[in-house]
Amino acid sequence: MTALLADATNLGLALTARSPKVSHSKFLWIAEWHVRDETYQAALACLTEIIHSQPFTSVWGDGGASWSDGKFFKAGGHGEVHAGYNTKYGSEPGVKFYTHISDRYAPLHTKVVAANASEVAHILDGLLHHECSLDIREHYTDTAGTVDHVFGLCHLAGFRFAPRIRDLAARHLYVADAHATHKSLHPMIGGVIDFRIVGENWDETLRLAASIKAGTVAPSILMRRLAAYPKQNVLAKTLREIGQLERTLFALDWISDPALRRRTNAGLNKGEARNALARAVFFHRLGEIRDRTFENQRYRASGLNLVVSAVILCNTGYLSHAVAELRSSGERICVDLLAHIAPLGAHHLQQRICLAD
């Protein structure tokens, strides 16, 4: 457990080994034999299943939705060599921990991506490669996720992709009939969907979707290849046509369905609150990534995600007991209000750390 905390808090094995209870060589042995991507993912899946099995978590969702977001961490020391730059986060190098979270606040998957890399390429990685038994049907992201290829691949993989659309007036809609009139939507019409190309390459597209779901090829690798293909590539064009159709249908739902807009915004707000908890846990070395290898950076991200999941499970238990105590004393608590309480508090943890020090 101490070795896991060494990754999660960014303390590292060398500093953790200063404890008189365990030697540095013992920590190295534990890390070499037990700390791997597979063990971290299996442990995360266990915690996620336990969180979803808590009756109290039903007030936050039915477990069929999720969202994903990247958290930027600055790089320092040896970590600057393998870090990237992104003007969105300033002039200092760093990396992003891209995390998928269910609507019950349970983290599903995490991976390290470059600071200047597009996050949309990794959306399906977390949806398809987590080891939980959750049936995710709808997935939320920020505005940057509104990419035609992602809409197409998510539809073929069985997910409803629901990114937040801020610049709706600048988005184009695509129609099936070029001769049809659409009255008030006419200024937003950007083109006609070519169903002929979709029909001619439908079998190849289905084989591609089957390969993704079977794990033969990682969705992020496929997305990068599609982006590198020329526009004349039939497979890339077919996915773009499917994506334009799905994006148009979603944009119409976005305009007409206020509940969809509220769900998406609420999901993204939950992700931002979870990132604040991750920042509070990942406190050592000013929260900077100083590992020179990508493998150690992955272990930092996995350890952090695992400990954040444990904190969420612990807070969920506390909230459940608190609500039960209030109700036993005669308090009337509205279930709708409980949906706005998040198990992401960290102040009590920081107080315990200070008392322990």
Image (cartoon, rainbow, N blue to C red):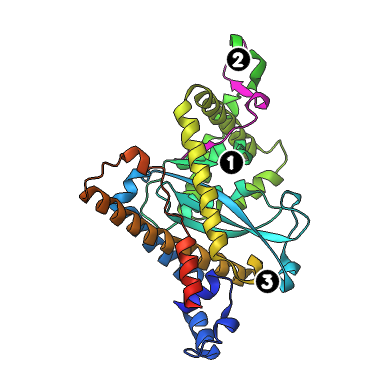
Q: What's drawn in magenta, residue-wise?
A: 159-180
* Residue 126 in sight in this render: yes
Question: Label 1, label 2: how many angstroms apart (C-alpha)?
Answer: 24 Å
Mark 3 is on which residue type? Answer: Arg
User: Residue at point 59% right, 67% down?
Assistant: 283
Give SS at disc 2: helix
Left or right: residue 259 versus residue 75 is left
Q: In the image, which disc is placed on residue 290?
A: 3
Question: Label 3, label 1: how many angstroms apart (C-alpha)?
Answer: 28 Å
Mark 1 — residue? 142
Mark 1 is on which residue type? Answer: Asp
Left or right: residue 92 versus residue 137 is right
User: Residue at point 62% right, 27% down?
Assistant: 168
Crowding at dot 1, Cα within 10 Å, few <14 / some 14-19 / many 20+, comes out as many
Residue 175 painted magenta: yes
Mark 2 — residue? 185
Q: Earlier in the sequence, mark 1 or mark 2?
A: 1
Q: Earlier in the sequence, mark 3 or mark 1?
A: 1
Above or below for 13 versus 115: below
Image quadrant where one finds the N terminus? bottom left
**In x, y percent, where is residue 97?**
59, 58
